[in-house]
Image (cartoon, grey):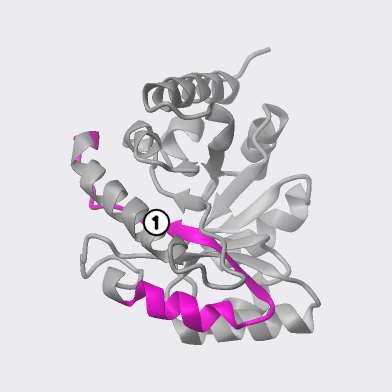
Amino acid sequence: METDIVSNIMNIRQRMTAAAKRSGRNPADIQLMAVSKTVPAERIREALNAGITWFGENYVQEAREKIPEIGRDASWHMIGHLQTNKVKYVVNLFDWIHSVDRLELAKELDKRAAQNQKTLKVLIEVNVSGEASKNGIEPSRVLELVRQISVLPSLSIQGLMTMPPYSENPEDARPYFIALRRLRDEIAGEHIPGVRTKELSMGMTGDFEVAIEEGATIVRVGRAIFGERQ
């Protein structure tokens, strides 16, 4: 029987494909991540059974309870703000950290990853809008941070992540997505050893189609998959 989650995912994938084709992109180059914060394990399993393989969690404590229950059939991504004192918990829970925005955090992630004999994939979170309420490093300091992190042996930079200001109109997000793409291209042009710049994690339920049109490789969708949060 088709559930609301299954039909929601089918609908989102159709919209993703259409957005990719509008911008001359291959839909296969764009990853759909289900944002599963506050979503119970049985609903996450429905999404897993419907073909979602990437899940994003925002809170360390919640992830510590859910991830062992659901298991490693999925790839788990930390997309929320990460305090340095919580790093010891996340290294063995998550495959990727999308919210690296300062050297202190990167060094702690590197140290813990080395202790666990693993390499963590990370994205640099950029505060493109400059909003005081948003986490992320300011765009003018990103290149310096990338250079500093590039020498840490247990971290692998994969690209950039951002979250534009909230708006009812998806078009309002476009300038921020363009800015992140241009920043990514600038970093790519520096050819820093060990740094990959393929990934742009941007776009959520309200604006993922615009994000895809502007180059997103990862879209983070929660509400459109799981419904309104309780």
Q: Secondary structure at mark 1?
A: helix
- Numbered range of the magenta stretch: 141-170
Asked if 146 appears above or below 171 in the picture, the reply is below
* Residue 209, picture quadrant: top left
Q: State which quarter of the image contains the N terminus.
A: top right
Whether residue 142 is in magenta: the answer is yes
Q: Provide residue 96's location: percent of width, then percent of height.
A: 62, 61
Question: Label 1 amino acid?
Answer: Asp
Residue under the point 32% across and 37% down: 207
Q: Nearer the viewer, residue 22 or 59?
A: 22
Tell me: 8 left or right of 164. Answer: right
Q: Residue furthest top?
A: 1
Q: Nearer the viewer, residue 229 or 198?
A: 198
Residue under the point 60% across and 44% down: 40
* Residue 196, picture quadrant: bottom right
Residue under the point 45% across and 51% down: 200
- How many numbered discs sit on the rendered protein? 1
Whether residue 95 is in magenta: the answer is no
Residue under the point 43% across and 42% down: 229
Q: Provide residue 97's location: percent of width, then percent of height.
A: 57, 64
Task: Give the labeled residue for mark 1.
Answer: 185
* Residue 45, picture quadrant: top right
| Camera sees residue 63 | yes
| Camera sees residue 83 | no
Tell me: 174 left or right of 32. Answer: left
